[in-house]
Amino acid sequence: MNFEKEKAKNGQWTLKLNGRYIYSKYNPQREATKNIISDFDIQASGYILIGLGLGYHLAALCELIDTNKSVQVVALNEEERIVFHSIEQDFPFAQYNIKIGSFQDIEWNGNLQIIIPQVWMNTIDEEHPLYFSLADIKMKQVTYKQSAEQMVENFSFNSALNHFDLVEQKARISQRKNACLVASGPSLKDTVEWLKEQQKELYILCVGSALNFLLNHGVVPNAVIISDPKDNIYYQVNHTAYTGHLFYLSTANYKTVQAYAHSKTILLQEGYSLAERQATDLSYPLLETGGSVATTGFSLLEYFGFATIFLFGQDLGFEAEETHVVGSTSGRIVSADEKLIEIPSNRGTSIHTTLNLYSYLKWFESKCASTKIRVYNTAYNGAVINNAQLVQYEKFLSLLKEC
């Protein structure tokens, strides 16, 4: 990382990283203040600020908070600290509860807000060890911010439907041992016949985007799960021949939920304050979501107590330009100039993945390492998921007989 200090037009110091300005070359403090105000959440009990720089973002944050609230600042490397201490600061940082350290030094206590000024994501390069983690957090924050109002609206309508029967659903299926979590990755086309032949032996939970593909191949899942707050998921379950059970996240698109005329159950998620409050009031289970409908589905199957879970279509990467199986209602064509991450595949070659899929891969790896469930992966052309053993058809059949 190459830091360069120079004077801005207004006489303040400004800073470049890798040849790009972190702050304005005209009025760095004013621009940094705008950055912080646009992201600031007054409800947080403390803050994690990514990037120290010359302290302008830190100064702006301190102006907005009480002195008793903590601010943990993550310096991206030691050189950055040297640059920070090389100029005189006019702001009285001493009166605030500030700790400057590395990402590993963070104390995760309370309702903390992570603030990542976009300028840092624009300037640090992919070689930095924190790049992909920070980019993932930032991406989720932007997505949440864009959908926040709709999520509140969805929650209000969905909770009024009163489908709070998750505990009863668990009791109904507690005797089943083997479950399949079906996503819509490209490999599903290679394994859908496994599901068709063995569907009577399995509890099949599929994400909404894979439903039409399964139905078109003669597979009728036991349940479908949806989580997206946007209207574009409406046709995933509606206007199909499916009449099975629907599990929906409390913030999932309420129009889709209301239009579905068959049995359904609401899921309350960790990390969403409205859902957490309702779970407390109703003594209702909370599920970890992991950021995607498939990760939420895994948490649901874990809650149900399945001993074995087979992952279908959980590629988390792709060989060609299609991110999902042809015929699903999700996915997109990856552009040639898009930044992609290279990861190992189960077939021994390399495939590419996007930042959001990579974050889900890491979630699955962490979950598979900590759970007591036996997890098997059927995506031969998909990403290697550590702690989820790859199985091919004969092994799949033998495992069904053993369990």
Image (cartoon, helix red, strand yellow):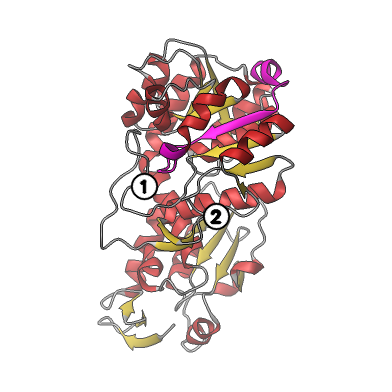
- Going by the numbered disc 2, the residue's amino acid type is Val
- Going by the numbered disc 1, the residue's amino acid type is Thr
**Residue at 29% across, 82% down:** 8
Q: Which mark is residue 266?
A: none
Secondary structure category for the residue under label 2? loop
In this rendering, would 371 be left or right of 37?
Answer: right
Label count reads: 2
Secondary structure category for the residue under label 1? loop
Q: Position of residue 332 (x, y in %)?
A: 30, 45
Residue denoted by label 1:
323
Residue denoted by label 2:
384
Residue 168, quarter of the rendered image: top right
Compare residues 248 and 283 and report the one nearer the observer: 248
Q: Position of residue 112 (x, y in %)?
A: 58, 53
Q: Earlier in the sequence, mark 1 or mark 2?
A: 1
Which range is magenta?
Answer: 167-190
User: Per the image, is 168 magenta?
Assistant: yes
Q: Position of residue 303 (x, y in %)?
A: 67, 31
User: Per the image, is 149 magenta?
Assistant: no
Relative to 172, residue 152 above or below: below
For the N terminus, give its image quadrant.
Answer: bottom left
Residue 396, quarter of the rendered image: top right
Whether residue 307 appears in this view of the structure is yes
Q: Position of residue 44 (x, y in %)?
A: 56, 49
